[in-house]
Image (cartoon, coloured by chain):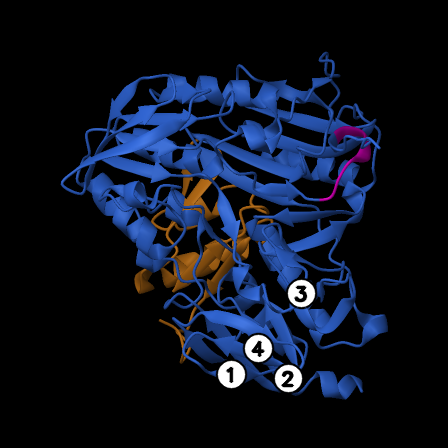
Amino acid sequence: MPDDLKSGRIVIVGASLAGLRAAETLRDEGFIGELTMVGDERRLPYDRPPLSKQVLLGRVRAEETTLPRRREVDAKWKLGVRATGVDPIARHLLLADGEQLPYDRLLIATGTRARPWPNAEEGALDGVFTLRTTEDAAGLAERLDAGPRRVLVIGAGFTGSEIASACRERGLEVTVAERGPAPLVGALGKSFATLAAKLQLAHGVDLRCGVTVTALNGSDGRLTGAELSDGTRIEADVAVVALGAVRNTEWLAETGLAAGPRGVACDAGCRAFNMYGIVTDDVFVAGDVARFPHPLFEYQLISLEHWGNAVAQAEVAAHNMVNPGPLRRPHLAVPAFWSSQFGLNIKSVGVPTFSDQVVLAQGSLEERRFVAVYGYRGRVTAAVSVNRAKWLPYYERLIQTAAPFPPEPATVEPSTHTPVPSDVPDPKVLSHGPTVALTGHLPDLRLTLRHWGG
Amino acid sequence: MKIVVDLNRCQGYAQCAFLAPQVFELHGEEALLYTPLAPENERERVRRAAAACPVQAILVEEEAGPDAR
């Protein structure tokens, strides 16, 4: 039986970071069968983080971020074709060109796409961009090269803030509009977000928080500006819609899998659940599109739009696709991400939004070198460093061991700071979508028990 | 040659920026900016940079495979 798992037909839907790393792992683990990679973009797997950094700074061309391979994957590539469905009984993947691809095991790694501007007509104006793909980045970089008078960035999450940072570095005027109280507040909580706001202002960003963009204006099909909910108007010839991401799950609607806007639910071993909550044995999930239980976060189903999670989860999924039950592994990696903006290197481990308190554990906000540690009900759940990446592994160990919060100081100088509420807002009040979606529930915090009359 | 750096691992030791400054550069105090598609004449320097990385965060693909771009 185990030998059978090393052969047969495996299809991977989604030819980006998770799909590629899964393919490499399958071959590393001795899979000798037929491997097919399906992707709706025409390009071979490429790296997206540089698109909002090196590419917008004009240092790297958007087409030059193809991912290096760890090894040959010996796969058949079907690029530029969308998957439209799965027949789970016949075990066929259905493609937009009409082809039915048979599989013995299927890996779903379709990721996310940029959330579009809600008004399609305004979104189609020349000068309005989202930032997710090579084409998006190439188009936006070209416009920035041309020297627009003002760039409007809608949404101050990580992507929006990185775009604003690149524009300022290039000397372009930027307005950032965010419905929440400050940039990055949805990912890091309010005390950190206050710093992020100061940082943007110090770098000359025209930062407008607590407002929404109510209309994008155009003339002759070109963007001319925008109207804000506080009644003000902005003139801009480029607008970047950075409202977060949408998970690519619509194509699974008729498959009977537990797929929806929050992702495809799976077990800790990356096996997809069907809509009855029964785990499948031949459909696996990895990357941004997966929604999985994490023991460090009370087995809530979480979805992570993180580079590192795509790699780690793809490796686990691939291992489990070619190994029998007792040899399967759980996906337990501590979530981690980075962002560079306004000259700072921001790194995070754990889930900062899974917190009720935060403390400045090391360093100082004034120097912009510090580590903030987040806790939930007396245990450490996350840490964020600014220009102090070397300190993070210590806190990662505290998270893994559920160490008490506030944490023991990592240095001889004890921190004099006391914990304060982490003030994580309800994602509903923000422009930028959360990059970490805690999609389970914390009964004490998120659930209101209602008694219906009668 | 294609390069990707695992920036979760990277701790800003900057060995790469000393060994292959045309390809790896610190942007600010510790944020690494690198060129994902490095010119062939950087091959030896990039190799040394990848080998010297204290946290082994640099992945390099030297040969263009049959199905590479």
Question: Crowdedness of circle 2 by 10 Å Cα count: few (<14), some, many (20+)?
Answer: few
Q: Position of residue A301 (x, y in %)?
A: 72, 49
Find numbered disc 3 in the image and state the secondary structure of the residue it sits on: loop
Work out how far the residue at label 1 is from the one at label 3, CA to CA, in angstroms.
18 Å
Q: Are marks 3 and 4 in contact (CB under 8 Å)?
A: no
Q: Are marks 1 and 2 in contact (CB under 8 Å)?
A: yes
Q: In the picture shown, does residue A57 fall above or below B42?
A: above
Indicate which disc, 1 or 2, sits on the residue closer to the N terminus: 2
Q: Which residue does the numbered mark 1 point to in the structure image?
A: A100
Colour seen for chain B: orange
Q: Position of residue A391 (x, y in %)?
A: 65, 33
Residue in view at x 45 percent, y 78 percent: A77
Find numbered disc 2 in the image and state the secondary structure of the residue it sits on: loop
Find numbered disc 1 in the image and state the secondary structure of the residue it sits on: strand
Q: Are marks 1 and 4 in contact (CB under 8 Å)?
A: no
What residue type is disc 4 on? Val
Residue A370 or residue A99, whichever sits in front: A99
Colour seen for chain A: blue
Indicate which disc, 1 or 3, sits on the residue closer to the N terminus: 1
Indicate which disc, 3 or 4, sits on the residue closer to the N terminus: 4
Q: Position of residue B44 (x, y in %)?
A: 40, 62
Q: Which residue does the numbered mark 2 point to in the structure image?
A: A90
